[in-house]
Image (spheres, rainbow, N blue to C red):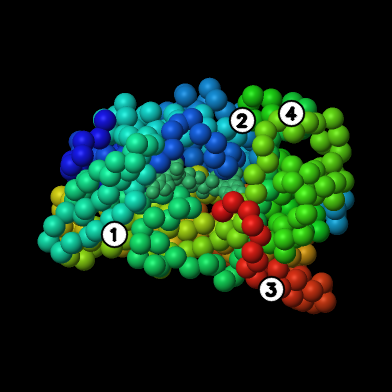
Amino acid sequence: MLEQETSCEVLVIGGGPAGSTIATLLAQRGRDVLMLEKSRHPRFHIGESLLPMNMPLFEQLGVAEEIKRIGIVKLGAEFVSPWHGAPVMIDFNDAWDNTYPSAYQVRRDEFDEILFKNAVSKGARAIEECKVTAIKFQPGEEALVTAKIKDGQPHNIRAKFVVDASGRDTFLSNHFDMKHRNKKHNSAAIFGHFSGAKRLPGEIEGNISLFWFDHGWFWFIPLADGNTSIGATCWPYYMKTRKTEPAQFLLDTIALCPALAMRLKDAKLASPVTATGNFSYLSERSSGRTSGENYILLGDAFAFIDPVFSSGVFLAMNSAFVGADAVDACLNQPHEAARALKKFDHAMMHGPKVFSWFIYRITTPSMRNLLMYQGSDSKIKKALISVLIGDVFGNKGFAFWLFMFKVMYYLGSFSSPKASFMAWRKRKNSIQVVEMGVAD
Ligand SMILES: Cc1cc2nc3c(=O)[nH]c(=O)nc-3n(C[C@H](O)[C@H](O)[C@H](O)COP(=O)(O)OP(=O)(O)OC[C@H]3O[C@@H](n4cnc5c(N)ncnc54)[C@H](O)[C@@H]3O)c2cc1C
């Protein structure tokens, strides 16, 4: 129940992975947290493939066993390219630091519900079907937030600190008019669940597979319920060519990728198909602390680039861990606040920056050649695998070898200038925003 007029120390907008994580951490520290979620769990969400570096976060939240129960183990990633020979398997165990050599694939309705309920069990107040609709920051006073429950009645909440974890709704970024499209990248996706897909054999059954094709790439994510999540991430111009219903368009797109079509030969669509467009954006800042403003932006509420390395949920949850320290400092130790917010802002920029170097180049011939390289024991490959497991925040001593990976990428590009130029030109033309008439 939400009273007509209420107050809290920390108001969290959104109960996805970022919101539920920070609500849990702050409630555990004795803070009065109110989390508002516009929908009701369990609800569908895309983003089903997790990274090994999610695992220590689950342990710290106390949900490791519950996530294990709903997940299928992911030991690595398979890359399949029509321009190369045999597929390549990346084994997470080959990372520089292999303390966490596996992750899970999860259904997000189950996963998000576990995190949300965990926040409540740790003492956060949480209200579902309650949408934050307006906010007013006032000098010298608490923020005034308006939220509407299903019945449409407005509720007023006073909050000392506001955490925006509203995901792609980017509530605060819109409020401050500080959301910008990523000029270096643009993508669109169409996806659904299939039954009867042919999975990899034995213990690598749960690995993610990535299939390149002419208009982008596909993900193949096995789920514990027997279904497999299939999605095409394409240049927006390709999505614009859609003349049929989303389900037929997805099936027609799969037919353009023979290696994937083979794996789905006996498969049947087992869910509605969803399309989402033009997703790649960044907010101007991730925190604010001037008179009357006390806020941070977590996860997708701050930025989202591309799903190719399955980094979204990890970055969202990690931002909540760093964010919890920043909120604590702002509320309790003003002398520590500037330092804590600086660390927070750095983490918010650093993670997406590390992944974006790879993301922007994923469809270039040089990057494909490097990812399709069969050897697994070189230090350069180990450094690459370390990024793929999400080991991007520590200083684990592989920075030099990651640098060498980039050197090899540029050498590869220069050694085939024509193919590289064509790929660059195609990419430049393809990242234009196009109106697609799909859900966003
Ligand atoms: C096509 C695609 C595929 C992806 N695949 C992967 C993947 O395989 N692996 C991966 O890690 N990531 C993936 N991602 C990214 C991943 O989905 C997100 O990065 C992740 O969900 C971010 O978590 P979050 O908590 O920041 O936001 P969300 O998970 O979006 O949660 C935000 C919550 O806020 C609620 N909300 C929004 N506005 C309001 C409001 N005004 N009031 C109250 N509540 C509100 C929403 O209902 C939602 O529950 C993918 C993304 C896309 C687009």
Mark 3 surroundings: few (<14), some (14-19) or many (≥20) residues within 10 A: some
Residue where numbered disc 4 is placed: 195
Foreground residue, 354 or 428?
A: 428
Residue 337 location (% of width, % of height): 21, 58
Q: Taking 383 as reference, is 88 left or right?
A: right
* SS category of the residue bearing label 4: strand
Asked if labels 1 and 2 touch by Cβ distance under 8 angstroms, the answer is no
Asked if labels 2 and 3 touch by Cβ distance under 8 angstroms, the answer is no
* SS category of the residue bearing label 1: helix
Q: Taking 247 as reference, is 102 left or right?
A: left
Residue where numbered disc 1 is placed: 341
Query: What residue type is disc 4 on?
Result: Ser
Q: CA distance from mark 3 to mark 4?
A: 37 Å
Residue 287 location (% of width, % of height): 32, 61
Q: CA distance from mark 2 to mark 1?
A: 35 Å
Q: CA distance from mark 2 to mark 4?
A: 18 Å
Asked if labels 4 and 1 touch by Cβ distance under 8 angstroms, the answer is no
Whichever of labels 2 and 1 marks the residue nearer the N terminus, that label is 2
Asked if labels 4 and 2 touch by Cβ distance under 8 angstroms, the answer is no
Query: What residue type is disc 3 on?
Result: Lys
Label tally: 4
Foreground residue, 176 or 399?
A: 176
Query: What residue type is disc 2 on?
Result: Val
Residue where numbered disc 3 is placed: 428
Whichever of labels 2 and 4 marks the residue nearer the N terminus, that label is 2
Whichever of labels 3 and 2 marks the residue nearer the N terminus, that label is 2
In the rendered image, the vertical position of residue 300 relative to residue 433, given as above or below: above
- Within 8 Å: ligand 1 and the Cβ of disc 1? no
Q: Which mark is residue 73?
A: 2
